[in-house]
Image (tube, rainbow, N blue to C red):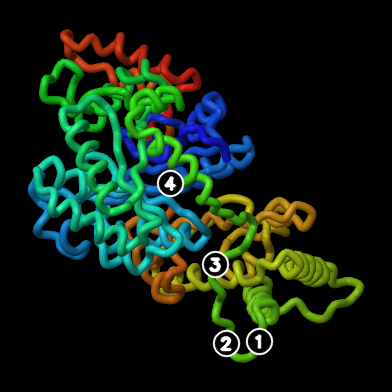
Amino acid sequence: MNRNFVHLHLHTSYSLHDGACRPEDVVQAAIDNDMPAVAITDHGVMHGVIDFYKIARRRGVRPVIGCEVYVARSSRLDRKNEEAGTARPHHLILLAETDQGYLNLMQLVTSSHLEGFHLKPRIDKEILAAHSKGLIALSACEEGEIASHIVNNDYRSALRASFEHAEILGKDNFFLEIQSHGTENDKKINEGMSKLASETGIGLVATNNVHYIREEHSDAHAVLMCLKSQTVMSDPNRPRFQGGGYHFKSTADMRALFAWAPHAVTLTSEIAGRCDVQIRFGDMHFPAFPVPGCGTARSYLETLCATGLHDRYGEMGPVTPGNHRKKEILDRARHELDIIQQTGFANYFLVVWDFVQFARQSGIPVGLRGAGGSSIVAFALGITEIDPLRYDLVFEGFLNPDRIVPPDFDVDFCQTRRGEVISYLRGKYPGRVAHIASFSPYSARVAVRDATVEDVNAQPSEVSIRMIRASPSGSRIESSR
């Protein structure tokens, strides 16, 4: 890996209403600046990791997978002591060095939402220590614990926290972060970090707190923050970043800013070179249905299908030259079962049958949309109420052996009782059930509408136009739904 600077502290649009960098633009910026690698470290989430990883690998840039986590000042389980702004959780940058580190990072972020969420998703040092293997940590921005102690003139606490983090992560896996955004605390923090590095031997690394790609995007980013806080640009109390330069700076920019610490600039490339996560796609991680007795998923599916066909079509009598109906039904069922077995999705059909059966037995309204209605096996199992033979539906539109992709039953449950189905699944398949989030990028029309308000002093229409022009294909401002 070359000695160019590498960004290790960067927020994409998945840091909702805070970052304004699209993953594809981050990778392009790295290429344009001859950087061999680049990291994304969104606030408390990893929503953009897969898109970023695929784009970076495809374009020959090493993806460094990270997250800027929130660390509770006491326990992540404590919901009482962090109400006030003075007791907000500290920030910490975590980067996955190895595949094990990637797994640990996912576990930490998951736990921060399921266990530690209070205003923000939080971890604590206890769980960090339990899942620290394969991770590299940076002390983060002014909101980091060590930087906060330096700002408060508490050098002794900063020293103690430095040793504590180095002990948790390993001395070679923890680094003291310095930044230069022209804030009144920058100089004080950087001097303190440099002193700590000299006294402790912990590495000093230069980063830029990137929230948008180009410098001229700062106005668009300011509008984005106003959308988040429901304020206007003319409001003197609106949230804003102190100083400036929160864009994707070049190696030359960073060398000029940190001419007094050139080793801190080149260290970013060394850290990035250590981070080599390999994400494998195409592997199935679906939970296994507990087949009763000593049977297999295929044999149990066949048994259920035979019973279901009898229930659906009644007694069809023996197969005779004149009984074409039974032959058609059985041939179609065998054809589908062969494809299901060939493609390895017998277990999937059983799991879907299981929770649909639970819903029906519990009196929870359930329905099916999409191509799953073309399966006679699904009809026999009661997953769907559509007879594919009656409507001449082709099974291969749902599951095709010549183009094997996971089938997808679009099952809908009653909105007021769907939680019962989710609870059932969580109990039967612990640790294997998750909600899926979807993200909708702002179109130009919606961005202008949301950014335009009745505030003559702010001239929002002009700002809105700049906001859209900042990204030719529409600003990647994300909103969850």
Residue at (20%, 49%) from the top-left corner?
145
Q: In the displayed structure, would residue 124 be above or below residue 195? A: below
> Of callouts 3 and 1, which one flags the residue occurring earlier in the amino acid sequence?
1
* For residue 298, side relative to residue 205 (left or right): right
Considering the image in quadrants, where does the N terminus appear?
top right
Q: Amino acid at mark 1?
A: Gly
Which residue type does callout 3 highlight? Val
Can the viewer see residue 320 in this picture? yes
Q: On the image, numbered disc 4 is attached to which residue?
A: 47
Disc number placed over residue 352 in the picture, else none: 3
Disc 4 crowd rating (10 Å Cα; few below 14, some 14-19, many 20+) is some
Quadrant hosting residue 459: top left
**Percent position of residue 465, x then y:** 36, 12
The residue that disc 2 covers is: 292
Quarter location, residue 229: top left
Q: Position of residue 406 (x, y in %)?
A: 64, 57
Of residue 265 and residue 144, the one placed in the foreground of this image is 265
Contact? badges 3 and 1 (CB < 8 Å): no
Alpha carbon separation for disc pair 1 and 2: 7 Å
Mark 1 = which residue?
A: 295
**Alpha-carbon neighbours of circle 3 within 10 Å: few (<14), some, or many (≥20)?**
some
